[in-house]
Image (cartoon, rainbow, N blue to C red):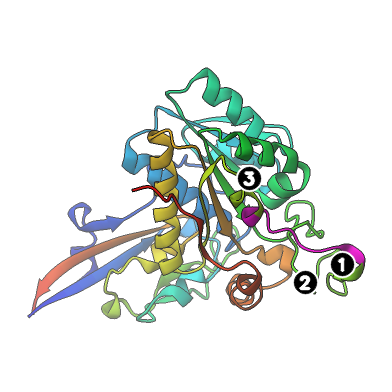
Amino acid sequence: MDIKDIIKPENLVYSKSKLFTDKALSYCPGCGHGTAHKLVLQTIEEMGIESETIGVAPVGCSVLAYEFMDIDIQQASHGRAPAVATAIKRLMPEKFVFTYQGDGDLAAIGTAETIHACNRGENIVIIFINNGIYGMTGGQMAPTTIAKMKTSTSPYGRDTAIMGNPLKITELVAQLPGVYYCTRQAVHTAAAVRKAKKAIRQAFENQKLKKGLSFVEIVSNCNSGWKMTPVDSNIWMENNMFPFYPLGDIKVPTEK
Amino acid sequence: MAKIKGAIVVEIEKCKGCGVCEVACPTQVIKLHTDVNGKGYHFAYMENPDACIGCANCAMVCPDSVISVYKMKVEA
């Protein structure tokens, strides 16, 4: 049996989402951002809402998301994506609005916007990529950097006595009444990707039903910031990030 | 008994050679090539195509979506 007999259009089971543009992603090799982009676009494609979706891109590595996603995207000032998304959703309530933010954007400079948008219960989806570092600027310590983690501004590891404690923003916003669904996922293995996709789908379905804010955290690697190979960084993430940021649903809707 | 046969196609010029697919493959089909593509990355390819079962794990974890997966039933 020749491979050419298998590679036929009718046998295709998995390929690149049609909502990607032809541009090559600007992310480092092995970065979880690409996988997260893919899951968002696949969800939008499966729900058939590509013409009704407006994304809000952050500042950070994913600032160029509008270059790669073939949907309507507004780029927001640093940390202000939830505020911009609030405005878009309130002016155009029939549209699906999501923000795609990193941890420097959402959990550092944009903490106020995030918490207030979550508290108001805006009917939007927030996709939060947490890699525990400021990846774009050269791997400096972020609020989400875990204890003892080495970064370029904490070269001996984060000492919580001097540098403070890492921020679990997902647990924090889960306390707020406006947040309807809150979950933490990862994209480093195929099983995790399947679960993360389900969570993103759930988040968009909640928005369709006007239930309130859905918050999906994706714990991701930053192999260049962590100074590891992509495969090693995924193993390091499993061993060090997941004990502090355990995967799973944090807040699920109680009513049936 | 019918057997499932799979195959992958890698967009060589867009592959960044991260090797995440190599680890994700349950049947050790994928390896990084000793040659490099236009950007100097060791791209992924099917080292052992007969073992591919078309599970799409590699394509699912591929951050750059460069892998397409094909799958068909073969009567043995």
| Circles 1 and 2 in contact, beta carbons < 8 Å | yes
Taking the image as shown, residue A241 lies to the left or right of residue A94, namely right
Q: Which is nearer the N-term, disc 2 or disc 3?
A: 3
Q: What stretch is highlighted in magenta?
A: A162-171
Q: Mark 2 lies on which chain?
A: A
Q: How crowded is mark 1: few (under 14 residues within 10 Å), some or many (20 or more)?
A: some
Q: How far apart are marks 1 and 3 (CA)?
A: 23 Å
Q: State the residue position of label 2.
A: A149
- Residue B25 lies in quadrant: bottom left
Q: Which is nearer the N-term, disc 1 or disc 2?
A: 2
Taking the image as shown, residue A136 lies to the left or right of residue B61, namely right
Of A46 and A213, nearer the camera is A213
Marks 1 and 3 belong to one chain: yes
Residue occupying the far front of the picture: A255
Q: State the residue position of label 3.
A: A101
Taking the image as shown, residue A19 lies to the left or right of residue A81, namely left
Q: Could you tell me which secondary element the residue under label 1 belongs to?
A: loop
Residue A110 appears in the picture as rendered: no
Q: Which residue is drawn at 46% across and 75% down?
A: B22
